[in-house]
Amino acid sequence: FFVSRKRAREIFLGMVDAGLGIEWSAVARVDQVLKFDEELWGLIRESGCRSLGVGAESGSPEVLSLIDKRISVDEIFECAVRMKEYGVGGTFSFMIGFPIDEEERHRDMLRTVAAVKKVKSMNAEIKTPVCYYAPYPGSPLYPVALKNGFQAPRTLKDWADFGFTTVMTPWVSDREKDYVERCGTFYFPIAFPDRRVLKWAASGLARLPFAMAHGLASWRVSRDAYGWPLEWQIAKLAARAMGRGQPIHISQFYS
């Protein structure tokens, strides 16, 4: 949407002049957001933008280079700060599980989770889903994925069920998946609650349990101490009992 800032500005002016009174969201690259001037930010807000979807992808400079993302880790953080300054929420999507050396892949996972934590600490209103690399034919990494043991879907129906929200490659372990989901969908949203979580936690029976969970999550996050995650196991059991399935997110308990 923001490839041409001139075009975007004209659309925003038209929306404001028409008095549409709508709320909207769009996707944008990190480097595009960093080029917004104060006038454009004002129009973005005035026209009703409440959220921008940004592909952050990784907390590892090497992986960002590998996938030709053309942004830096520091720019991801700067983008989060800029959006907070102008009162725009958003979603920063990250990804793990690229077909690279096992040691580098593990390092990328830790760096990416650390980047997610830093983004949430900078701007709690930003959602930070962590997805899994999914090999697609025609992409530069697809032959590498095949070489590393990826079994491609064989039928059109199988491709229809293929995606990046579940692990589709053999090199992402259940332990790594659990670590990513434990931090990204449970501890970080509780340690850095957004407005929706705070509103839910301030009411009724949720107040005391959330206060306890927030204290424990904040302690774990401040020390990167995620071992023996009893409360995470309890949350998974509770989600399963509620019929919410996997993966879980703190929002499942107030949505």
Image (tube, helix red, strand yellow):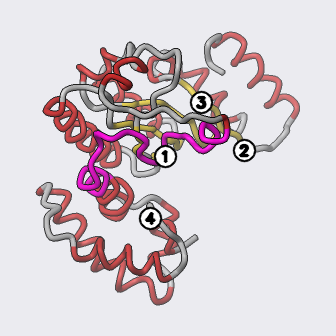
The residue mark sitting in front, 2 or 4, is 4
Q: Earlier in the sequence, mark 3 or mark 1?
A: 3
Inspect the image, locate mark 4, and give the three-letter code of the amino acid beneath it. Answer: Ile
Mark 2 touches mark 1? (CB < 8 Å): no
What element does badge 1 sit on?
Answer: loop
Instruction: Find residue 130 and report its image quarter.
Output: top left
Select label 4 or label 3 by which is in front.
Answer: 4
Q: Which residue in the protein does label 1 denote?
A: 165
Question: What is the C-alpha distance between the residues marked 2 and 3?
Answer: 14 Å
Say what amino acid the circle numbered 3 marks: Val
Residue 26 is situated, as x and y percent measured from the top left of the image, at 64, 32
Q: Amino acid at mark 2?
A: Glu
Q: Quadrant of residue 144?
A: top left
Secondary structure under badge 2? Answer: loop
Mark closer to the observer (3, 1): 1
The residues colored magenta run 157-180
Question: On screen, 2 above or below 135?
Answer: above
Q: Could you tell me residue 197's position as x and y percent?
A: 47, 66
Q: CA distance from mark 4 to mark 1?
A: 12 Å
Residue pictured at 19% horizontal, 27% vertical: 101
- Sequence-first disc among 2 and 4: 2
The amino acid sitting under disc 1 is Thr
Q: Residue drawn at (82%, 24%), measured in percent from left and top?
A: 14
Q: Nearer the viewer, residue 163 or 62?
A: 163
Q: Quadrant of residue 56?
A: top left
| Number of the label disc, if any, that sits on residue 248 | 4
The residue drawn where x is 70% and y is 18% is 9
Residue to which mark 3 is pinned: 27
